[in-house]
Image: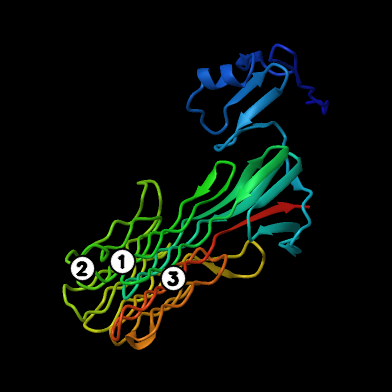
Amino acid sequence: MGGGVMTVNINGAGSLTGLDAVDVPVYADATARNAAIPSPVAGQIVFVTGTGSLVYNGTAWVALGVGAANFTNTSTGTYSSGGIDYKYVEFLSSGDLIVDQAGFADILVVGGGAGGGSAGGGGGAGQVISTTSFYLPVGTHTTTIGAGGAGGTSSGLGANGNRSQLLSLIAIPGGGGGGATNVTRKGLQGASSGGDGRDAATSTTNASILPSVTGFAGGFTAASAYSGNGGGGGFSAVGGNGSGYDSGIGGAGVANLLTNVSANYAGGGGGGGYFGAGSASFGGGAGGASGTAAGSNATANSGAGGGGGGGQAGAFNGGNGGSGIIIVRVVV
């Protein structure tokens, strides 16, 4: 057989030449395309007049042959791994991502963690979204970094965190830790829910606001005036239950290597204790030590829950939840 080069062309009507006769669907604009294909699947190809040939990559319609995106923000860091050079930018507070070349990027979005309850349960962790090959169009894109929820006061609930968002990537926040009264004792719903405060009569908390969100429940406590409080739910595990005077630990979060340095995100806050306070990891705040101290604040930009306040000698305040973060990495 000969070694000639095959030339393939796509004309203005979307017809292919150089192969067997094949026509891809042609649409006047994106509105017409979306109306005709409301639920595209990865690998579908269309031709949009004035735009060109597009393929659906499982997330978005992108131009055929698209490579890495580029941002013009000052990079937070650069590194090489596996023979590939990367740069990345971290958003610790809300701002703008400026993209001058459309293409794919790896992105981490973490929602804000919740506050711990006063003399109560640990705060729940925010959602973690980690995605590779996310299509970034050219433009200035707002990054919203969710604040952590405030710790509860005067036997009250911790506040829910706030969501973080970049384009269609929305990480919902954690749920506040329960307090120390019949009204406030139940941990709140969130990406992961807050732990129950003492005297909580029920033994479960809801894991998430939305069925599609991967989150875990906070721990519960026995119906006793002197029991330990539940730990807040983490992104990877449930919060620990109170046992006797001792409070539950915060649920585990998750580590991420997008910056080439392992960082921990979205752990639940430890429950505040009557005597023994719950510990926390993955950025979460510890519960009030020995039941006579306020809960610790979660680490900033961790999306973790704050620790519950102690309750042996009064209703001590819960710790604040950790704010969220967004990281964008591209190949250079």
Q: Nearer the viewer, residue 198 or 213?
A: 198
The location of residue 159, given as percent across then percent down, is 40, 61
Q: What residue do we see at 39% from left, 84% from top?
A: 293
CA distance for labels 2 and 3:
19 Å
Q: Secondary structure at mark 2?
A: loop
Q: Amino acid at mark 1?
A: Gly
Q: Horizontal placement of 315 versus 163: left or right?
A: left
Above or below: residue 55 compared with residue 189: above
Q: Secondary structure at mark 3?
A: loop
CA distance for labels 1 and 2:
9 Å
* Quadrant position of the N terminus in the picture: top right
Kindly indicate whether the residue at mark 2 contacts the one at mark 1 (C-beta within 8 angstroms): yes
Q: In which quarter of the view is residue 76 placed?
A: bottom right
Which of the two labelled residues, at mark 3 and mark 1, occupies the earlier sequence position?
1
Q: Amino acid at mark 2?
A: Ala
Q: Which residue is mark 1?
A: 178
Q: Which residue is mark 2?
A: 200
Q: Which residue is mark 3?
A: 306
Q: Amino acid at mark 3?
A: Gly
Q: What residue do we see at 29% from left, 56% from top?
A: 206
Q: What residue do we see at 49% from left, 72% from top?
A: 298
Q: Horizontal placement of 177 versus 60: left or right?
A: left
